[in-house]
Image (cartoon, rainbow, N blue to C red):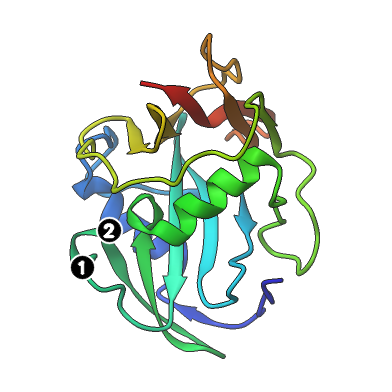
Amino acid sequence: MALIHHTTLTPTKVELLAGWLPTRPWYHGPATPELTKAGGFRLDDPAGEVGIEFMVVTDGSAAYLVPLTYRGAPLPGADHALVGTMEHGVLGTRWAYDGCHDPVLTAGLLALIEGHAEAQAQSITDTPDREVARSYAGAGPVPGLGAPADTDRSTEFAVPGGDGLVLRLRRVLTADSTAPDGALGHVTGAWEQPDGTRARALFATLERR
């Protein structure tokens, strides 16, 4: 169970993302975005070492899903995926990574799809997020995931697995929670739009290649 510390964070997550998002080829907003944290959820790391968060931020009418991991030391071989560092009032320096490149996050997302993990509220300790829905139509455990595919330019990020399966994460969200035909599993979630209404979208799918 991840313990949520209500303390200072410098820079804040939104400030960190405001500098990082414009460097992404799939981001199509202004060079200096005005981001709002609009939704998302957390997963627990079974080892209790890595923070895992799926954050939704909005920039006007556009919504982006940003999977993040927070670590107490650099992740070897993942310099290309570093979003930045933050100073946490309790935990000290935290290295924030694009979680698509972090095996702890992709394993946790797969466990969520299979029903072996439960989505947690972003800001409350030990509280399930009931807005997150998942499904899995497979007959057994999903084979282990491989290295992420080189799809950083796409609005989807693909992580191949065994038996011809691929885990896809949406980076740019649209208000459509319909899973594609043939998907073995999926995760949907919600966020708050600028007008105060709630939107729901497909966050991730498990599909055959």
Label placed on residue 197: none
Which residue is disc 2 drawn over?
A: 19
Tell me the quarter of the image containing the C terminus.
Answer: top left
Which residue is disc 1 drawn over?
A: 77
* Count of labels in the image: 2
Query: x and y percent of residue 71 in the render?
Result: 43, 76
Query: x and y percent of residue 73 in the render?
Result: 36, 83
On the picture, is 39 further left or further right than 72? right
Tell me the quarter of the image containing the N terminus.
Answer: bottom right
Residue at left 40%, top 31%?
166
Determine whether the residue tagged by mark 2 lies in a helix, strand or loop: helix
On the picture, is 73 further left or further right than 177? left
Determine whether the residue tagged by mark 1 lies in a helix, strand or loop: loop
In depth, the one of 84 and 45 nearer the eye is 45
Q: Amino acid at mark 2?
A: Gly
Tell which circle, 2 or 1, labels the residue nearer the N-terminal end: 2
In depth, the one of 9 and 107 nearer the eye is 107
Q: Is residue 124 above or below residue 196?
A: below
- Residue 87 visible (yes or no): yes
Residue 45, quarter of picture:
bottom right
Query: x and y percent of residue 49 in the render?
Result: 53, 77
In depth, the one of 151 and 190 nearer the eye is 151
Q: Is residue 176 above or below residue 147?
A: above
Residue at left 18%, top 60%?
80
Label 2 CA crowd tier, 10 Å (few <14, some 14–19, many 20+): some
For marks 2 and 1, give the CA distance.
22 Å
